Amino acid sequence: MADIDVNIDPVQHNRDAWDRLVEQGDEWTLPVTSEVIARARAGDWSVVLIGHEPVARDWFPAALAGIDVLALASGGGQQAPVLAAAGARVTVFDNSPRQLARDREVAERDGLELATVLGDMRDLSVFADGSFDLVFHPVSNLFCPDLEPVWRECFRVLRPGGTLLTGFMNPDLFVFDRDAEGNRGELMVRHALPYSDLTHLSEEERVRLGGPGGALEYSHSMTAQVGGQMAAGFHLVGFVEAPHHAGVTSQYMPGYFATRAVKP
């Protein structure tokens, strides 16, 4: 294992990394088109929580009109504007100013009302208790060092009967050597879990694999992901999986999991 660089602030580091990914045109930073928004206004809409798989419509309220939605760590001009066009009152909370700017671009272009708030997903103190009916949290907590405060805050800001939809990575993916997979198409077990870029890779490897200032990633156990939601008070009522959208592992195991949880 590599020595931890105590000088790295993971929140600021990943904020800068995602701002750069916007500049580079990463697929999760490309806003939806006006045609997608027009269809959503007409009732024809879908959003993704894991990979490229649309979320089942019965995971959402029967109608979104008047529903207060927190799009948590969900910037990029993709899911939040679609939910707003479908009738929800949407607030986007994200760590990247450039990702939030994507949502504002779509809102201004297509005449949507949505709010954007900058911050760390572990701290939702800007919101009062019981502010939302739905928290939509697509795959993003791999960029967060610890999940207990995320689930605790999600539970707090939801109203009784509110729903948390979460997508996350299969932690088993992090055991493999990324060099071997990317360069030779081989699956070579290298890392013990739990995994962190800061503790498992040297600085040279972090730069080579993720680019200078690439986003820091963390694995989280199923206990932290699923058990953590239940420990926060949620009732798990839905679970699905999907293949990773790229890489050799997609041939052998699911790359993503998603949960639907309800606050009693």
Image: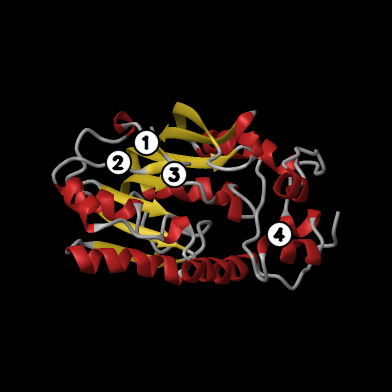
The answer to whether mark 1 and mark 4 are in CB contact below 8 A is no
Which quarter of the rendered picture does the C terminus lie within? Answer: top left
Circle number at residue 46: 2
Sooner in the amino-acid sequence: mark 2 or mark 4: 2
Which residue in the protein does label 3 denote?
A: 155
Q: Residues within 10 Å of mark 4 (few under 14, many from 20)?
A: some
State if disc 4 and disc 2 touch (CB < 8 Å). Answer: no
Q: Residues within 10 Å of mark 3 (few under 14, many from 20)?
A: many
Q: Which residue is mark 4?
A: 209
Q: With 241 as the anchor, is 208 left or right in this view?
A: right
Give the CA distance from mark 3 to mark 2. 25 Å
Q: Disc 2 residue type?
A: Ser
Q: Quadrant of residue 59?
A: top left
Along the line of sight, which residue is nearer the eye, 154 or 245?
245
| Residue on which disc 1 sits | 55
Sequence-earlier tag: 4 or 3: 3
